[in-house]
Image (tube, rainbow, N blue to C red):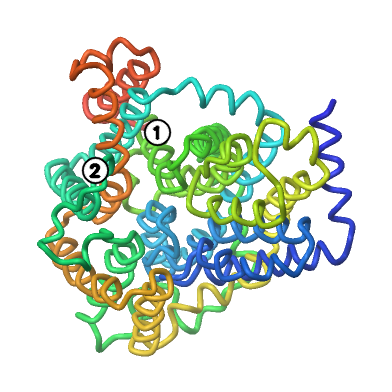
Amino acid sequence: METFLTLLGGFAALADWTVIGFLVAGFLIGTFFGAMPGLTSVLAIALLLPITYTIDVIPALVMSAAIFMSGMYSGSITATTINIPGAPSSMMTAIEGNALMKQGKGANALGHAALGSMIGGSIGAILLMGFMPLAAELSLLIRTPGKFSLVLFALVVIVIVDKGAIAKGVVATLFGIMLATVGIDVLQPIPRFNFGTETLVEGIDLMPIVIGAFAVSEVLIQAQSWNSSIGDQIKDADGVKIRRRDFIPPLSEIRRIGLFTYLRGAIIGYGTGILPGAGGSMAAFVSYASAKSSSRHPEEYGKGSREGLAAAESANNSMCGGAFVPMLMFGIPGDPTTAIVLGVLVINGLQPGPRLLEQQADLIAPMFASLFISALILIPLTLFLFGPYFVRIVQIPKGLLYSAIAVVALVGSYVATFSIFQMFLALLFGILAFFLRKQNYSTVSMLLGFILGPDLEQYLRRSLSLNDGNPMVFLTNLDSLFFLLLTALFVYLILFRKRPAAPS
């Protein structure tokens, strides 16, 4: 009953036109920042953090939640149209969405991305409101060995998804892990692999890796065919009128995807979001791999699979709801964006903890409602209003578009880190990623290795140090054993199981 009262109280707060104004403003800001390579929802909330000193707590939290949801969704826009994910969580969307774009089905791809985002985000918000206390207790059951096995599971799944290039995937993942070791040791205040320079003591920031691997490298790849416009590479010719109804996915395609795909993606995304540090990238990766392993049409993946697109987008948006659980219950951010939202809470005098909902539900509930409204109403509304303009991105002359993206991306890497050195690293990694992509090495695997590498090392060393170096600790802990068995199951399903032929 208390959960329903909290839910109703949150929606009642949104009846205030001032609060609604902040919600819509936050959604539009998040959409812009999420769609622009190098500008993320993390950066949007960070730049708006000083504003929270001057407004009430409810509008501040509502605006932050709207930025979070819209930033997660809008990363699919440039991922689909120009193959540059606006956010790391949209990398799997770029694989399928851009393939559809090149087939002249860009509007359809954006429609499926929005539908998956809407369903996943709505379910994630509902699960957040209904099961947050229980989910928080379950997340506490995962101890250090289990966290290591979970991270290992994520890395293995991403490597084996591309069955035709597993060796290259392993190399790219290990390279990402190696990059993550530069800087201060994860357990001791000792610099390592900094080559005697103070510049690398702080390590390599995530933003230059993301911008270099996806934005800069894409600019270089497109520069190879500089004489043609982007529109020439896609079957959606300039003369074809794109109607708003083209963005509505046909019912036959939704049935082919299956309701279970959306629900599974939403549950995977929410569950992944509960785990601190997992984030939308892991949620999208795991959901995408799960969908591919059980798909009747795995041969379509990588070539424009709407099923893969729906699985990834429903998961990364559902993650938004799950990420609030550890942040609100224990003050442990589930991802970088909720880390900034935690700052908004603290600035307004709200201390995370089990009693937060009991004592200040009237302040927190509107944030939950904002997540739900942003997913259920604003995502499809935004696509319907601005969808044709999203697709028209590809009609901008290549020189103008990619020059602007390169500038915005490099400036974004500086704004995110305030370091000229990190900005040059973005350029360096862009050149490196360009050559890796030319040789079919997965930059997605490299990025995931970089993101999860520190956690993998930290949990491994802590588990072994607490158990006298005995590796059996990973088999004797039930949570760790569960994730190891899950890893083995995915390896079997993806690599070894023989699927029945699809009916003709």
When asked about the image quadrant of residue 380, the answer is bottom right
If the image is split into quadrants, where does the C terminus sit?
A: top left
Q: What amino acid type should be assigned to the residue bearing mark 1?
A: Ser
Q: Residue at x 53, y 62 (%)?
A: 41
Determine whether 232 is above or below 195 in the image: below
Screen quadrant of the N terminus = top right
Residue 497 appears in view: no
- Label 2: which residue? 162
For the residue labelled by badge 1, is the local secondary structure a helix, a strand or a loop? helix
Figure check: 32 above or below 230: above
Q: Is residue 153 left or right of residue 106?
A: left
Q: Report the residue at 39% width, 54% height from top.
A: 96
Q: Earlier in the sequence, mark 1 or mark 2?
A: 2
Residue depicted at x 37% and y 72%:
413
Disc 2 secondary structure class: loop
Q: Position of residue 381 (x, y in %)?
A: 70, 63
The x, y position of residue 93, in whole percent, is 42, 54
74 relative position to 377: left or right: left
Residue at the extreme top of the image, as rendered: 476
Residue 337, x across and y down, in percent? 53, 54
Judge by depth and name the residue closer to the eye, 500 or 365. Answer: 365
**Disc sitting over residue 290 in the figure:** 1
Cβ atoms under marks 1 and 2 closer than 8 Å: no
What kind of residue is marked 2? Asp
| Any part of residue 44 in sight | yes
Is 48 or 158 nearer to us in this picture? 48
